[in-house]
Image: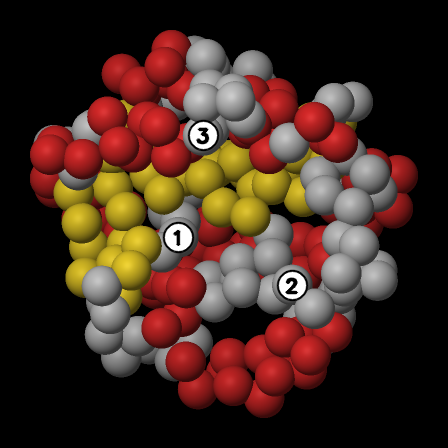
Amino acid sequence: MVVEAILLSAGESSRMGKPKALLDWFGQPLVLAQAEALFEGGANRVIVVTGAHHDEISDTIIDKPNITVAANPDWSRGKTTSIKTGLRELSTSCQTLIVLAVDQPRPAWAINQALQSHLNSNCPVTSPRYSGHGGHPLLFDAALFPELAKISEKHEGLRQVMKRYDRAMNRVYFDNSVVRFDLNTPDDYETALKTYPSLAENP
């Protein structure tokens, strides 16, 4: 089973005031910590999609094994352009795709739990759930890649695909809010540094 991941790192990070991908995350840049978690969680390859801060991010992960940097020149037109940039870099042997944003730090165990559930479900798409709400990462079967390649901001992006397969979706229920963790502002980041370690512990 070939599993590849798209790690979305193209945004301007205007609310954070600095590139989120380069935030110190317990001793290393967040983008590297995220890539390592994806590998430990079951991904064979990680595609980091860059945009506004391409040079700084690519310099950080240059020559890292099994990491591909894909620059999205249209990053300012929305997240869907970054997803499609990543899709174009998938290997022809990829059977399962993990999609995660760099500002959504996830421990390896949570990624692996979602992945194993997806593989065992035979469903085309998997979404983590916590307290009645959807989380991340999202996982997609290769059969959906052609549909993912057609998403657009106008038609709600990934949300449209998720709605289309709502009845066929595999939902993985977590008792841990880590699957909804998100870093948007400096306050979010400072809070995360205090609360993430306990949430990230393998239950």
Residue at 45%, 30% in the rendered image: 156
Residue type, numbered disc 2: Asn
Whether residue 133 sits left or right of residue 192 in the image: it is left
Which disc, if any, is residue 156?
3
Residue at the extreme front of the image, as rendered: 154
**Foreground residue among 167 and 87:** 167
Is 135 rendered above or below residue 186? above
What amino acid type is highlighted by mark number 3?
A: Glu
Q: Where is residue 180 drawn, in percent x and y?
A: 41, 64
Disc number lying in front (2 or 1): 2
Q: Would residue 142 be found to the left or right of residue 12 on screen?
A: left
Q: Check disc 2 and report the residue beneath it.
A: 184
Helix, strand or loop status at disc 1: loop
Occupied quadrant, residue 75: top right
User: What is the quadrant of the N terminus in the image?
Assistant: top left
Q: Earlier in the sequence, mark 3 or mark 1?
A: 1
- Disc 1 target residue: 136
Which of marks 1 and 2 precedes in the sequence?
Answer: 1
Q: Position of residue 95 (x, y in %)?
A: 32, 24
In this rendering, is residue 198 above or below 42?
Answer: below
Say above or below: 72 vs 138: above
Mark 1 belongs to which amino acid? His
Residue 88 occupies which quadrant of the picture?
A: top right
The answer to whether residue 94 shows anywhere in this view is: yes
Cβ atoms at labels 3 and 1 below 8 Å apart? no
The label nearer to you, 3 versus 1, is: 3
Q: CA distance from mark 2 to mark 1?
A: 15 Å
